[in-house]
Image (cartoon, rainbow, N blue to C red):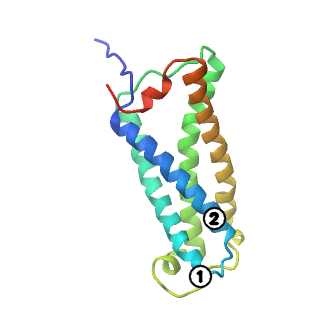
């Protein structure tokens, strides 16, 4: 007895997908803002704390999303009619998981290397490091961010290509409904 693949993703998968979209978008915008502030500015601590919390939440959500992706039924892979592009699509999906995961882990590593937790969340009164770029994890964090943005743009562009050029109603798969 064979099971018929669903037409849409499970609502939990849809929720995780769009929650990750929002979290990554806000964390990226906030991260760009924070990086423009000098480290000796007192007003940098609060947005840095929000950025760190968003990163932690994103890590939990992306792990939960990956687990549910493995366990819940999902639609068959979308196809462009081109085997090479279809393989690129699968690769990009997994790369998105990897890069979001690496982004959060590099942020946590930076927090540990630079002693941010007591400064940001413990009101230690200590100053922020003079330059975060002195830490390897910050360099990695800064490299992953634009790579992740490129992957997101590729992913969104492919979804729009499916929706408007191939007219296969791909976006309905990642939304709520019957």
> How many numbered badges does the structure rendering display?
2
Q: Residue 40, image x and y in percent?
A: 66, 82
* Crowd tier of the residue under label 2, counting other residues whose Cα lies within 10 Å: few below 14, some 14–19, many 20 or above: few
Q: Mark 1: give few (<14), some (14-19) or many (20+) Cα within 10 Å.
A: few
The image quadrant that residue 141 belongs to is bottom right
The residue carrying mark 1 is 42
- Residue 108: image location, x then y, percent: 53, 64
Observer-nearest of 1 and 5: 5
Res. 115 in view: no
Q: Tag 2's secondary structure?
A: helix
Percent of width and height locating residue 110 = 59, 67
SS category of the residue bearing label 1? helix
Distance, label 2 to label 1, CA atoms, is: 14 Å
Rendered-image quadrant of the C terminus: top left
Reading the chain from its start, which is encountered first: label 2 or label 1? 2
Q: Which residue corresponds to mark 2?
A: 33
Q: Residue at x 44, y 27 (%)?
A: 172
Q: In the image, 28: left or right of 71?
A: right
């Amino acid at each position: 007895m064979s099971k018929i693949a669903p037409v849409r993703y499970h609502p939990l998968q849809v929720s995780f997908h769009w929650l990750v979209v929002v979290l990554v978008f806000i964390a990226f915008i906030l991260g760009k803002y924070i990086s423009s502030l000098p480290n000796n500015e007192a007003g940098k601590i609060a947005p840095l704390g929000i950025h760190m919390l968003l990163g932690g939440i994103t890590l939990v959500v992306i792990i939960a999303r990956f687990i549910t992706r493995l366990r819940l039924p999902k639609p068959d892979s979308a196809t462009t009619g081109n085997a090479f592009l279809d393989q690129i699509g699968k690769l990009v999906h997994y790369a998105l998981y990897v890069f979001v995961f690496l982004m959060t882990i590099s942020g946590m590593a930076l927090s540990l290397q630079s002693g941010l937790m007591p400064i940001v969340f413990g009101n230690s009164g200590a100053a922020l490091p003079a330059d975060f770029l002195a830490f390897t994890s910050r360099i990695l964090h800064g490299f992953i961010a634009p790579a992740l943005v490129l992957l997101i743009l590729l992913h969104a562009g492919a979804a729009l290509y499916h929706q408007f050029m191939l007219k296969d109603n791909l976006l309905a798969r990642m939304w709520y409904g019957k």
